[in-house]
Image (cartoon, rainbow, N blue to C red):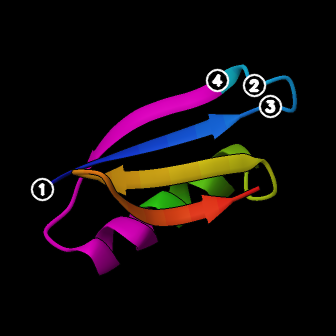
Amino acid sequence: MNYFLTVYDPTGEKLLDEQLEASSDAEAKELGELKLKEHGYEEHTHRMIRSGKLLLFHR
């Protein structure tokens, strides 16, 4: 399944916009959290979606 992870800076500019592939929502959340940690974006506004379903969100 395809998932989309997007990270924004305080002005709304996209800092990261990546497509991830995973076999389940749980695996996608893990991959997304690792990607956020890898780039130091854990505390930035971010979201991960799959077919309109929101899996991760931080404001």
**Mark closer to the observer (2, 1):** 2
Is the residue under label 1 in contact with that under label 4 (CB below 8 Å)?
no
- Rendered residue at 66%/26% (across/down): 15
Q: Secondary structure at mark 4?
A: strand
Q: Secondary structure at mark 2?
A: loop
Task: Identify the residue under disc 1.
Answer: 1
Q: Which of pointers 4 and 1 lies earlier in the amino acid sequence? A: 1
Task: Identify the residue under disc 2.
Answer: 12
- Rendered residue at 72%/19% (across/down): 13
Q: Secondary structure at mark 3?
A: loop
Query: Which residues make up the magenta segment?
Result: 15-31
Is the residue under label 2 in contact with that under label 3 (CB below 8 Å)?
yes
Task: Identify the residue under disc 3.
Answer: 9
Task: Identify the residue under disc 4.
Answer: 14
Q: Is residue 18 left or right of residue 53?
A: right
Amino acid type, callout 2: Gly
Amino acid type, callout 4: Lys
